[in-house]
Amino acid sequence: MLAAEISIIEYVTEQNIELLLERFRSLGPLPGILLTFLKSFVPPLPTIVIVGANAAIYGLWLGFLYSWIGLFTGSLLTFWLIRKASDTPFIRRWAAKPKVQKAMVWAQRNGFSFVFLLSMLPIGPFVVINMAAGLTRMPTVSFATAVALGKGVMVFCVSYIGTHLSDFIDQPVKFIGVALFIAASLWLNRRLQAYFKISESTNFTESAS
């Protein structure tokens, strides 16, 4: 298993990904979407490399869109599958692992921020995040919103920096714009978190009465 993961990492370079995307470019957006979609099921795939390659081949905006669609749908499908299979012996054994238990505690305490903030990171245990959220019975709308925004921030930053790397080297001040974008996203996260907390409290009160 470890040897297979190492071989995948060694093969998946930005140059190889760009060659692969160019070869199947006649299929339109499908290759770019499929590669990022697979990230939710093949953890060794490097997010930064794939997102950067999409931006290089399709351009900033289309590359951003295709990467975002793939990551979002992959996360949502993982979340849904785990929710449906949460009572199976295999999932129960997986959920008993210390790393998963820790992730579930974080998700239960502050589900929206947990998913949003970790989705913003270009590297991390994305599969564990999606599965932990599914096991904690986090509302689907809340999860989908957090993933959509978090992945959107991450994919845009990686795509933008990748397609403007020479500009950033010559003019480091341009990083301020990216920092402001991230700060605005964090502010939006706080607002949405408060909204979902109010909504959940209202639903709980109504069901209790």
Image: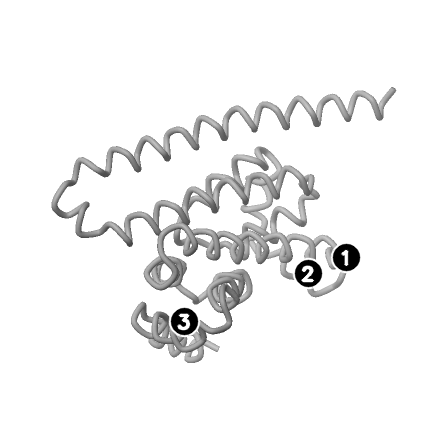
- Give percent across and percent down for residue 128: 55, 54
**At label 3, which amino acid type do we have?**
Leu
- Give percent across and percent down for residue 93: 66, 61
Residue at horizontal 44 percent and vertical 26 percent from the top: 187
Residue topped by disc 2: 91
Label 3 environment density (alpha carbons within 10 Å; few <14, some 14–19, many ≥20): many
**At label 2, which amino acid type do we have?**
Ile
The image's mark for residue 206 is none
Which image quarter is the C terminus in? Answer: top right
Residue topped by disc 3: 21
Q: Is residue 206 above or below residue 27?
A: above
Of the residues tagged 3 and 2, which is closer to the observer? 3
Along the viewing direction, whichever of 67 and 95 lies nearer the viewer: 67
Residue at horizontal 48 percent and vertical 61 percent from the top: 36
The image's mark for residue 87 is 1
Q: Is residue 203 above or below residue 90?
A: above
Label 1 environment density (alpha carbons within 10 Å; few <14, some 14–19, many ≥20): few
